[in-house]
Amino acid sequence: MGFIETLGIDIIENHADGVSIECLVRKEFFNFRGVVHGGLTASVADSAMGIAVSRHYGPDTPVTTVEMKINYLRPVAAGKLVARSRIVRDGKRICVGQVDVRDGDDNLVAIALTTFAVLKPAS
């Protein structure tokens, strides 16, 4: 997917209930305070859950984010972001997940709660 490639996100591990991905921090991702912009952290969290949900339901079932709440816990100024997604509840129409985002030193930097819609496959 172009957006994930542009951010430089790589899948580093598959789990039974989700995935782990990482994104190397680049200066282009900094805000005016010299730390990672919250939008990058949110994009990494959303991507981790989106990959997990897509893999869970399979390539023929479209899914899309309908809601995400994120708590930012500490700033990141260098290194990488590592996101570990977990599917909490998988239903026929809705899938809820949690993502823990950590820095390269394994400090928890954000927690996201996501809701994805499971759409009908295209005919």
Image: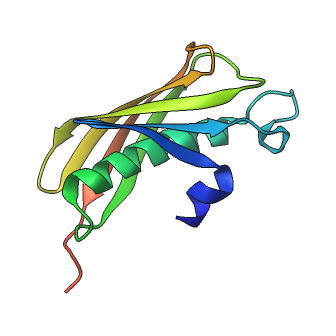
33 in relation to 108, above or below: below
- Which residue is pictured at 65% across the width and 41% down the height? 40
Number of numbered discs visible in the structure rendering: 0
Left or right position of 72 against 68: right
Left or right position of 23 against 112: right
> What is the residue that sits farthest to the left in this orientation?
92
Quadrant in the rendering for residue 49: top left
Left or right position of 121 against 14: left
In this orientation, which residue lies closer to the viewer: 42 or 101?
101
Quarter of the image that includes the C terminus: bottom left
10 in relation to 36, above or below: below
Residue 94: % across, % down:
21, 51
Q: How are the residues colored?
A: rainbow
In this orientation, which residue lies closer to the viewer: 65 or 53?
53
Quadrant in the rendering for residue 28: top right
Quadrant in the rendering for residue 107: top right
Residue 21: % across, % down:
49, 38
Left or right position of 16 against 33: left
In this orientation, which residue lies closer to the viewer: 61 or 67?
61
Residue 3: % across, % down:
60, 60
Residue 91: % across, % down:
13, 48
In this orientation, which residue lies closer to the viewer: 24 or 46?
24
- Which residue is pictured at 55% across the width and 14% down the height? 106
64 in relation to 19, above or below: below
